[in-house]
Amino acid sequence: MDSPTADAARFAQRLNRLRLRFRPPRRETALSAREVCDLVAQVTGGRISETHIKYLISGDRQPSLKVADQLARAFGVTAGYFTEPDSSPMVAGVEADLDKLELLRSMQEANVTSMAARMKDLSTAELAAFAEFITAELHRRESQAGPA
């Protein structure tokens, strides 16, 4: 087999980022190849074999335009996300959105979102006092724990 191309490696990197971001709540591992196949079928009605997805995940194959489009639609991104250079504003925008999704996931898993919703009616001074309290509490815990 020929060595993977830079395009196949870029596609794999971005597909793997999407697989990780769209994983189920409270799960550390990315969507499996089977789960990606199921997602494509559910969203697009199309089919991609699990074996083909595994090749794409590993960067051993470059997808056809049809497969790239199916995957893009399944993950809710434009097909250009897979093909544009890293410096593209479109890629930067998708990456920023994925970072926000990950932050929201982390906040939800830590129940921060419910606390933030309760805090929305606090004044600026009250929010500052709350932030000061949290900072002081974290410093107190660090000093009790001692050196790592």
Image (cartoon, helix red, strand yellow):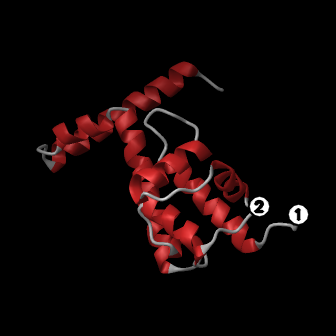
Q: Quadrant of the C terminus?
A: top right
The kind of residue tagged 1 is Met
Residue 65 visible in the displayed image? yes
- Residue reaching furthest top? 144
For residue 96, what is the image quadrant? bottom left
x, y percentage for residue 23? 49, 43
Query: Where residue 60 is drawn, which disc sits there?
Result: 2
Along the line of sight, the residue nearer the viewer: 145 or 56:
56
Residue identifier under label 1:
1
Asked if residue 33 lies left or right of residue 73, the reply is: right
Mark 2 / mark 1, whichever is N-terminal = 1
Q: 113 or 94, which lies in front?
A: 94
User: Looking at the image, which is closer to me, 145 or 69?
Assistant: 69
Mark 2 or 1: in front is 1
- Mark 2 packing: few (<14 Cα in 10 Å), some, or many (20+)? some
Q: Residue at x 44, y 25 (%)?
A: 140
Mark 1: few, some, or many residues within 10 Å (few <14, many ≥20)?
few
User: Does the CB distance between marks 2 and 1 fall below 8 Å?
Assistant: yes
Q: Which mark is residue 133?
A: none
Residue drawn at 67 percent across, 56 percent down: 52
Question: Does 24 appear above or below 83?
Answer: above
Q: Which amino acid does label 2 sit on?
A: Asp
Residue 87 placement, left or right of 104: right
The answer to whether residue 31 shows anywhere in this view is no
Residue furthest to the right in view is 1
